[in-house]
Amino acid sequence: MIAGVLVALLLGGVGTSFAIAWRPAIATIDPPQPQSFAPGLVKRGRVLAALGNCNDCHTVRGGRNFAGGLPVPTPFGTVYSSNITPDVETGIGRWSEAAFQRAMKLGVDREGRHLYPTFPYDHFTNVRDEDDRALYAYLMTRGPVHAPARDNELAFPLNQRIVVAGWKFLFLHPGTYRADPTKSAEWNRGAYLVEGLAHCGACHTPRNALGAERLNAIFAGGDVDHWQAYAINAQSPSPVPWDADALYAYLRDGFHPDHGTARGPMAGVVRNLSVVPADDVRAIASYMADVFGAPSAERRERGEAALAQAKSPAAAAADSAGGAIYAAACAPCHESSQAPPYGGINLVLSSAISSSDPRNLANIVLAGVRPVEGELSPIMPGFAASMNDAEVAALLVYLRSRFSKQPAWSDLDNIVAEARRTQTASLDTRTDARNASSDTAQRAKP
Amino acid sequence: MMTLKVNGRDHQIDAEPDTPLLYVLRDDLKLNAAKYGCGLGQCGSCTVIVDGKAVLSCVTPMVLLEGKQVTTLEGLGTASAPAPIQRAFMEEQAAQCGYCIAGMMMRAQALLQRNPKPIDEQIRAELAPHLCRCGTHMRILRAVHRAARLMDTAELSAVDKRSAP
Amino acid sequence: MNVPIILDRRRLLAGGGAFVVSFSLTGAFAQDQGAPAASPPAKPPGSLEKSPYLDSWIRIEAEGGTTVFTGKAELGQGFKTAFQQIAAEELDVPFASLKVVTADTKLTANEGYTSGSHSMQDSGTAIQYAAAQARALLVAEAAKRLELPAENLRTENAAVMAPDGRRLTYGELVATDFLHVRAEPSAKLKDPSTFTVMGQPIPRVDIPAKVTGGIAYVQDLRLPDMVHARVVRPPSYGAQLIELDAAPIEKLPGVVKLVRDGNFLAVVAKKEFQAVKAMRALSAAAKWKETAQLPKQDDLSAAIMALPSEDFAIFERNDPSAIGQTSIEATYTRPYQSHGSIGPSCAFAQFADGVMTVWSHTQGVYPDRQAIAEMLGLPPTSVRLIHVEGSGCYGHNGADDAAADAALIARALPGAPVRVQWMREQEHGWEPFGPAMVTKLKASIGADGKIADWNFAVWSNTHSMRPGGAGCLLAAQHMENRFAVPPAKPLPLPEGGGDRNAIPIYTFPNAHVMHHFLPDMPVRISAMRALGAYHNVFSIESFMDELADLAGTDPVEFRLKHLDDRRGRDVIEKAAERFGWRAGQQAPADRGYGFAFARYKNLAAYCAIASEAEVNRETGRARLVRAVAAVDSGQVVNPDALINQIEGAIVQSSSWTLYERVSFDDRRITSIDWQTYPILRFDAVPENIEVHIVNRPGKPFLGSGETGQGPAAASLANAIANATGKRLRDLPLTRRRIKDAIDA
Ligand code: FES
Ligand code: FES
């Protein structure tokens, strides 16, 4: 069905709007000398690259920085990230600044080919020229790495890049982002980052059948790498409502005592946000707090109740299979006196348990939280090897009923089995960067 | 009272369901190999094999062990009749204080059972949950490679024997 | 030539202030200390000086068994095997037939602490000379009985052989007290060229049990009717217990006893996990009053420098004719660092018939006996300390404290064998850490491109608060009638503590070395592998690279230009050659090469290390990729065990150097597990480490267990500087610090 729509798009795109579909190549240049960029510009570019989380997609674990090759799974197939080092043959070494800027704004590479929207130019189109310039300066001063692009794994007709033109016709809206003069400078800075470079919606907004963000459900929660990217608006599953301070702390430190620890694909984002200027993170937090909106009285009460309950946990009732597992395997840490992130969040506060989607909880129970080499980082043992699917499902049922006020999850058996498949595959077969598998579960980010 | 199968034998265990397997192995069954290192799932010294998979026994409560098979280092071989993994660690002299080693060996054993010819990166990735403070890592890696070779030849010779007339 | 002098601190402390020339680092002395056989020392060597009777070391039974005794403790270095090799070699008894008994106050000599890489020097040497002399005595006895000249006899396989085929076994030759004779300083050692056991990579005797689940550690001991204890420590230094409702805990399943003595709290249960649960409940029930008394972590070096100090000029050399032209200076810092044993401390104690027996992985059975006896108010003879191996300790970790805990609890439960196991957070929170240090260096280069003037100053606590008396034991500090922590003392030179390796081994025409000893210890500290040498060598060898850069000379060549010590030059050349070091070579992108050298304590083993590091310029993550070491530890006894030690030192030191820092707020230690005190994991294990031994047959054993720590740190730091063009001087060289330096 989707393919059919796309074929229609393709034909429509080509037929009605050749002008959009066709883009000229931009002439190659001799790679600029790193010294030709002002150091201040490069520095700004470094910060922007961190805000844009560029390394997360363009670097594979154990691979060279920005050399690409990361498989990005989509419902339509696998797209590999590209080499954005200044290598002249396989990277962007011969791209002029204009070519780079066009890619950011219009999703077209130097030769004029349409880029797949896994590269989130629907957001990057909002990035200001001077920021593109700084990003360009930064990338062009990185070490060049010879790393040829990998062929995407997309079926016809999606492997025809012209299809993308049709997609853009519908979903790319350059030049529409505007500052809101009625809001504070901080709010506007945050909005500019969130809607543009930081591309938060790319994960947190659900996508339609054509893979575009649904404008009527902005920030209502999305999917990424077998994880749920939570709703980050009024529909947030977080038991305690978010506010700007909590968001700031979470984005900056990677955890907040009332919300827990960033993990899954969000872990890389907060790692990047820990090195950018605090003001930028504050701005993002301030804008997003507005997106979340002030909590309703009912919501606030629920939050306070959760906090109160977390402070005086009732003794775990080991009256069910799941309860017994919780009491024995989870409570020793999650009810310990050590504070998060090193002591385990009290599960009353867990978004994973309150969310309508149990995948994150299943993932975390199975895979745990792995230590980051050489850094202070929370560690949770994964239980994939010691719990079978039935035990995990029983535990999930118990956690849901004890720690949330939400209705029971359904289809847990399949969800747990799927989580096991995706979360533990990497343990068995993780290999080096050169032959990174296209199975998303085996993606190894830096 | 529950039945726990360890190294092929059934044991009647009288322990609360929240008792971590580690304490049952050491305290009730008087087995030495699984070691207490952190009790928090952070270091790997307590690793044993449960139903073929490497498991941190310090965070595996008894409630999860009904009907499962536990193997400890003691169940693999003895000093006089060592299993290939044990022989490999002896031959590489892969220990300093040795406190971490039993856990390392159990995870390596589970890996080799699943994947008899792991590449170096896979061994390193597999051993990531394990800490060694003495810095014996280079030898541990060598010993796992050696164990893979030993198991290979052990299997071959077993096959030879079977196929002999 | 100008005369360098070392100022002996003991005299200074005594108030004399006299300058004493104790030794020179240059010239003949440092070249080497002479082959023992050729020029025997005047007093019995090694620990024979203090325990001179041969039967303290070797016993031969009439039935034929031979046992070797050492007062040292096996800590995973493998010296038990080495001692067995030495005795087998010098005695001519089969290796496998020997038994080695280690530290036990009832059985072995008092060899103080197993520390400072002294085991081979002290105990190994004693065993070697004792065995050689014992063999000579056996031959003499046989000569008498066979009526043959001793020169005609030879020994083999625990027997004396006559040319005519007659044979007397050692068992036949010994009578009671046969070996109760004083050691002669002049015992004649075997010619190293005839060695068949020494110098061989004999598999370590302790490994089979360790890889098959045998009883290998104190943690594995099981005594009949034993009980399990757990202590509940205060939440912070100096915290006072103000409230405790113990009654519900006493009723918990399996609980046998609750022990409270002032701020000392412990619970004893029948089964181990019952003890753990009771401990958790006890810990939740106890209310403490805490005081903020820890220094500011974010400006640690300022806090260190602000402590009152006692200042000692420990080395002076002046040559006004050498004039510096350009000079640089730098400050290097080291945080508190943790031993981080993988197995938290554990001990057994049993109080029966007025005698307290303690099984412990302490490094000093005799000093610990003294301290525990003092704590319990018992005569030392009523306390027996038996060493049983624990997890690797790398210095003074919680072992002695756990032993004291066990003894205090056992006293409350007469007859019962009590097993105390520390929890992970107790080991991390309460072990005595390796002290924070600050060094300031300043040097100038003369017209000849050599260092003309060298200034080195180090600020440090002492590096040993080992018991020392009961006041060094946590349990004794927490008791109602508490023992005060004894005042800290600097460890005397030439070995030193905070100033260990502070005196440069290089020959500089002008050199001034200051030790600013800091008696106040805001954080509990004690001996950690290499003591001050880790940071001092890191500082000196980093600064040597900075100076080489200033002089425009290759770092290896620059070191050789300043080093007269031939054995030192040999290891430097060996490491450089095996690494493939070439002056001016360029490492591949994002990689760097580094070199460093030291002789541990300036009197133990020599070690040079060349390293290749990789730095990720975007993340700042640094990794040791490859290291090549050369080591000279005199006569090699077991080359593989030596290589194992050096490999381990390099990996461990790279973990210290890249990652490790004890953290705390104003009251509590906050690095209490492996999340909050990360150490190296397999992700960062180097691709390859090579260790090359420069063997010195017939030369005295030189301790090597700690010799790698400093050079490994500096060569890694130098490689990172080479890769990034940035010099980092504050340990640890974290990802964040490297990234900030690159981005600056
Ligand atoms: S003791 Fe189980 S992981 Fe450390
Ligand atoms: S050998 Fe000592 S901890 Fe690994």
Image: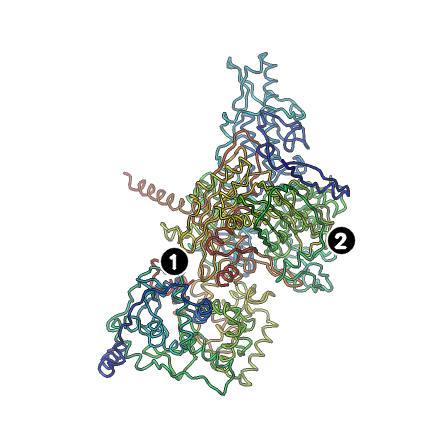
Some atom of ligand 1 lies within 8 Å of the CB belonging to the residue at label 1: no
Which residue does the image show at 37% across and 79% down from the upper left? A213
> Is residue A376 shown above or below C108?
below
Say yes or no: labels 1 and 2 on the same chain. no
Is residue A393 among what the camera can see?
A: no
Residue B12 spot, x, y in % from top left? 52, 54
Residue at mark 2: chain: C
Left or right? Give the position of A306 relative to A181: right
Disc 1 to disc 2, C-alpha distance: 55 Å
Q: How many marks?
A: 2
Give the residue at mark 1: A430
What coloring was used for the rendering? rainbow
Residue C674 spot, x, y in % from top left? 55, 57
Mark 1 Cα within 10 Å, few/some/many (few <14, many 20+)?
many
Residue at mark 1: chain: A
Q: Which mark is residue C482?
A: 2
Mark 2 residue type: Arg
Secondary structure category for the residue under label 2: loop
Mark 1 residue type: Arg
Residue C403 spot, x, y in % from top left? 66, 48
Q: Which mark is residue C341?
A: none
Residue A73 spot, x, y in % from top left? 35, 69
Secondary structure category for the residue under label 1: loop
